[in-house]
Amino acid sequence: MPLDGVDVILADLDGVVYTGRNAIPHAVESLNAAAATRRIGYITNNASRTAETVAAQLSGFGLSVTGDDVVTSPQAAVRLLATVVDAGSTVLVVGGEGLTSVVEAAGFRVTRSADDHPAAVIQGFAPEVAWTDLAEASFALAADIPWIATNQDWTIPQERGIAPGNGTLVSAVHTAVGRLPLVAGKPEKAIFDAALEQFGASSPLFIGDRLDTDIIGANKAGIPSVLVLTGIDQAKQVLAAPEGSRPDFILGDLRGLDEVYPATVESQDARGARIFTVGDAAVSLHGNVVKVVEEGSSRVDLLRAGAAAVWGSGLMIYGLVVDPALYE
């Protein structure tokens, strides 16, 4: 099972536990069941809210969570900030309470104006961030001071759809100043290091819904990973995932945490095609052609078999002819 030998589960939030104000089906009961025997920590790149606010939302869904069970990208960003500026320095903050509260708690003085000659800029998402905030950051960064971003997520899943994330705001400042920030959140290691330390994990498992932040980040940190198909990335993105962004487990939803994970069996047919079988689903790889042999009874098993074929080909996705039945 995915949870075999795991002492701490590290779970992303958006797309894993909830979307907007709505809990994702089967997530709460699955995490509660896992919490009976393991510590669960929650990791979020969302910088707009405090750990306590996040914990309150999760508790409202029926999870047993306190602020100590949550690691936010602002917490990781402030750890980075402390390595590049002196204690008590004035820092220009672009973001909301989720970021300002952590910066102040660490002993730094918060300003919103470049005229205060800040020692650094720290930037995170909040719905109220405006052009004027981005302009002040740009003015301050002209002095070549350190710049730290909580995260660079391009999108945020909301109940009405997909909205622009902090990455779009960071990109706007980058375009103005011509350089890039240090990044604390996924896919960088800083937030994973903070979580491992906070939860005392020795055999963690990370659960995410995005390949470009969650899974890459877990792989960089050396943490086994689960991609759950309840958020951003779906079959097409899984098949196209380059090495480095491939998960150890692919689950349809979090009920799969407590189910036996089927092995991928490779064989060869009379033509010399490689056959990848997961459960009763089978996919062939012949030359550069990936084709469904048996759809089977589980769409997730079919995707697992297809991913094994594509990833086992040694070719990039654009060098393959992939059966549309695998991703449509």
Image: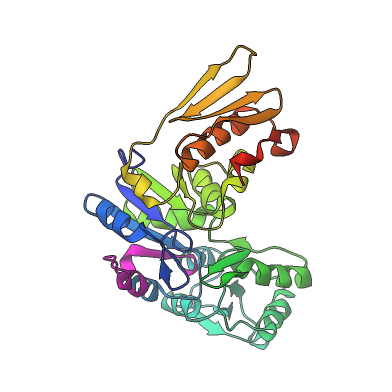
Q: Position of residue 293 (x, y in %)?
A: 57, 28
Q: Which is nearer the eye, 142 or 189?
A: 189
Q: Position of residue 261 (x, y in %)?
A: 38, 36
Residue 235, above or below 209:
above
At 30% from the left edge and 71% from the top edge, which residue is drawn?
A: 59
Visible in this render: residue 160? yes
At 54% from the left edge and 61% from the top edge, which residue is drawn?
A: 184
Q: Is residue 112 left or right of residue 71?
A: right
Q: Is residue 10 left or right of residue 89?
A: left
Say which quadrant the N terminus sits in: top left
At 52% from the left edge and 48% from the top edge, which residue is drawn?
A: 215
Residue 126, above or below 315:
below
Asked if residue 64 lies in the magenta stretch, the reply is yes
Q: Position of residue 181 (x, y in %)?
A: 65, 64
Q: Which is nearer the eye, 164 or 294?
A: 294
Asked if residue 91 lies in the magenta stretch, the reply is no
At 49% from the left edge and 51% from the top edge, which residue is drawn?
A: 229
Q: Is residue 301 left or right of residue 27?
A: right
Visible in this render: residue 187? no
Name the quadrant containing residue 145.
bottom right
What segment is highlighted magenta in the picture?
56-74
